[in-house]
Amino acid sequence: MEKEIFTKLLELKLPVIFCPVWGLDGAMSPGVLEALEQNRMLMLEMRNRDGDLAAAEQRNRFVLEHADKLWLPHVTPGGMLDRLVRELNGKEKSL
């Protein structure tokens, strides 16, 4: 589902933050290059590429803390994103 949403955001030419889990190798599709050239994409390559939940939480926390606006099409109740969003809302962050 994430890949489909990402592809749709690129097709609609909307701004997006892209955090490829395994680094930038192989992440440069034509849609990604176009979005970068049009200044619609922020690409984050995190040092922790373990692909585990700790690495995912590190990436998610960074994006949630630094994004001006968020669109979360699905958040699993009680899951990591739910917990992080609640934590940030408790710090007066507008989401």
Image (spheres, rainbow, N blue to C red):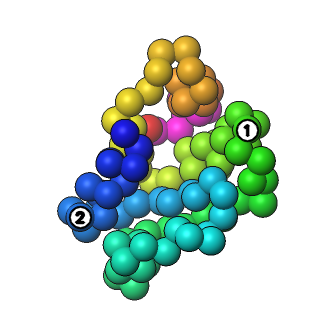
Tag count: 2
Give residue 60's position: percent from left, percent from top.
60, 43
Q: Name, please, the residue furthest toward the front.
A: 26
Image coordinates of residue 79 in percent, x first then y, are 56, 21
Residue visible at 62% across and 71% down? Answer: 25
Q: Residue at x 68, y 38 (%)?
A: 57
Q: Quadrant of the C terminus?
A: top left
Q: Amino acid at mark 2?
A: Glu
Look at the image and give the residue range highlighted in magenta: 88-94
Indicate yes or no whether the magenta region holds residue 65.
Answer: no
Look at 47% across and 21% down and name the residue there: 76
Which mark is drawn over residue 52?
1
29 or 16: which is nearer to us?
A: 29
Q: Is residue 45 visible?
A: yes
Q: Position of residue 75 (x, y in %)?
A: 44, 27
Amino acid type for the residue under numbered disc 1:
Asp
